Amino acid sequence: MKYLDEFGDPELARALLDDIARTVTRPWAIMEVCGGQTHTIIRNGIDQLLPEQVQLIHGPGCPVCVTPLETIDKALAIAATPGVIFCSFGDMLRVPGSSKDLFRVKSEGGDVRVVYSPLDAVQLAKDNPDKQVVFFGIGFETTAPANAMTVKMAKEQGIPNFSLLVSHVLVPPAITALLESPNRRVQGFLAAGHVCTVMGMGEYVPLVERYHVPIVVTGFEPLDVLEGIRRVLVQLEEGRAELENAYPRAVSAEGNLPAQAVVREVFETCDRAWRGIGTIPQSGWRLSPAYADFDAERRFDVSGVVAEESSLCRSGEVLQGLIKPVQCEAFGKECTPRSPLGAPMVSSEGACAAYYQFRRLERPAVTA
Amino acid sequence: MTEPLDLEAWSCPLPLRDHPNVVMGHGGGGTLSSELVEHLFLPAYGDSEGVLAQLGDAAVLGVPGGRIAMSTDSFVVRPRFFPGGNIGDLAVNGTVNDVAMAGATPLFLSVGMVLEEGLPLDELDHIARTMGAAAQRAGVRIVTGDTKVVDAGHGDGVYITTTGIGVVPEGVDLGPHRVQPGDVVIVSGPVGLHGIAVMSCREGLEFGSEICSDCAPLNGLVDALLGAGVDVHMLRDPTRGGVAATLNEIARSSRTGVEIVERDVPVPDDVRAACGFLGLDPLYVANEGKLVAFVAAADAELALATLMAHELGAGATRIGTVVEAHPGVVVARTGIGGTRVVDLPLAEQLPRIC
Amino acid sequence: MCLGVPGKVTEIFEAEGTRFAMVDFGGVHKRVCLAYVPEVVVGDYTIVHVGFALTKLDEKSALETLELFRSVGLLDEELGRMDDAPAPAPASAAEAG
């Protein structure tokens, strides 16, 4: 595929890795925020190819992993309601709620469907006027424009049987919370490329200035991720802290203005609970009052949902980069992809699942 | 698909001709059932003078002495019709292939069908004729069958179960017990076609493509390999779960490790593209016309040449090796030179956005 | 979170009151909403996420980035000949994109 395959070229990867090896003179800890980048790293074995001194910490950039438990439980309750077609991205189907997941609801008779785009859900609403079609709108800023436009179209076309269960999360507040944490070990960040495609880079300038950390906007192909890592390391070695764009083919400083406009119209900022981390103020988006009619939480009575997290699950510490999945006592025992205790063991970007899948051969590292 | 179903030739009562759908009576064992068998299944399966036409409760078959290989499988694919084939193709080839993977020559098939009331007879006829044609292509005979009908809403159109019998030639002994470190792993051609073809027309995920299922009978390919004297240790067709599932199953059952080179696994460009935007890994996508062969290292070149000379093995490639290390685990060398464990898929791969 | 894949716009049309396109991802075609990329025309490459084009892919930039990677490789080759010399920071590091 054009503009994809070239960015996986093994010789160029080797060149970047060699340069990284030459650049590094002491230990550094870098975090990639985005789950898609975690996936690339683990799937390609990048973390093994890096010099020993470079530690990659997998951040909470998996919206699947950080969707609040309560929201999952609400989704399960709605999906189990007769007369509802519940549509979701594939990622969410096996994320555990307090007692089950969407897959289980499907097997118990709920009409749960995987779709590629929220537009597919609206089409289902039009094709099934006698049913209520609900779309599970999770994701970072990258997905918000799609969800926003879909709701806007539903409103303009007057589609009464469509609604959205929203749980959007925002990257900059999450990075801020991480940087504010007293346990902070992360010294540099790979910012999520497609989040910046939408939002631009401006939100990261104050973070770089206030916390003096290098932030490099990074893409998702192997070479992109290596280059992002390389640039962060170069900055760290030189004692610089700047905002750089290593993904210029898809990211501009101002981002996508039409998308930002529609998102501002359809959503409003709110506090959001991040599963495993806790509530981060002003870190989420919910439907604005003008679109409240399309809010599934209002359309369905889900107020009685009480969420209960597993006591064994240490996903919060994993998501903050404080421990590696292998250091959790339940890893690989009570908690496996087959019977996950927390979301990071389910999503392929979740650090725990990635470790389980791709790193089963390793013994856990002794040092924290 | 041949000529359309000619309901006029049926001697059935008028109502059936007026309602060309499956009704409960078709599974009842009475007149309607016989009509279906005589006028739809028999002509479609193509054994009018033979065993099937005798319509006995059991088919009595002459089988050469030796070991019998037997396999059964059920087919519930949705959608029933997809680019490159339909559920009928899968039902015949799937079981033919399972028998062939034992190194056996497939001979006979039985066909059990569970039909949902309301299924159009035209569609059933198309499926049945497809099965007849597939059986003929594979060189097997459909010798017995059964049909039941369930109430509308209690089935999914058509469920098919086929059971196949074949004979294992003297001296052929394939299985995990034969797999050992040093063996070469070969795939008979490009992977990912069937799974992507089916997904391309699944509601909610549809996309336009020319990708067709690779559904095909593999017994000819197996005969070629064994006939050329290749020291084959194990064969398996990577259906559900793809090459990844197959390699894992074999690694576990043979208690050896398998190492593959990702770049060597042949994936057609458009399959890779589809996997790309759906977020799927081609290693986990189903195939219906490919085999994975574990052969003695010394015969690797001969195996490849033999496969490539056959129309169904044109893209045969060596993808890996059996090793002593990490028994039961499959490890891949990634595109950029790293390594990753290729784990057994938990369940069906789902498209992702992350 | 970000599965955004580049594809080529092969056809543009109106539907549901907004611009849509058929996008070719290396042989596979998908209907994509162009509401957010009014500047994109047939022949352009775009990054698509869950059925929406998020940006026009800057092809010139893509090629420059690949060139940058190649130059890193060449620089490494040169440095390889000066075994113990400390590696100077590559000039490209200052590029702010």
Image: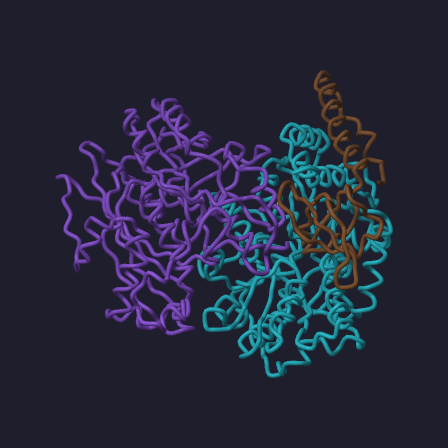
Chain colours: A cyan, B purple, C brown
Residue C40 location in percent, x, y? 81, 48
Please count the marks in the image.
0
Q: Give me the residue at 53% from left, 66% from top.
A: A96
Q: Is residue A72 left or right of residue B157?
A: right
Point 67% across, 56% down: residue: C50
Q: Judge from the rendering whether residue B155 lies leftward or rightward of residue A138; answer left or right.
A: left
Q: Residue B30 at what x, y percent from top left?
A: 24, 70
Image location (x, y in percent) of residue A70: 61, 73
- Say if A226 sits above or below A86 in the image: above
Question: Where does the image place residue A105, in percent across and percent down from the top left?
Answer: 50, 71
Picture quadrant where residue A84 is located: bottom right
- Residue placed most toward the observer, B113 or B240: B113
- Determine the residue located farthest toward the top in the rendered image: C81
**Residue C85 seen from this side:** yes
**Looking at the image, residue C76 lies above or below residue A89:** above
Q: Toward the viewer: B110 or C79?
A: B110
Report whether A26 appears left or right of B32: right
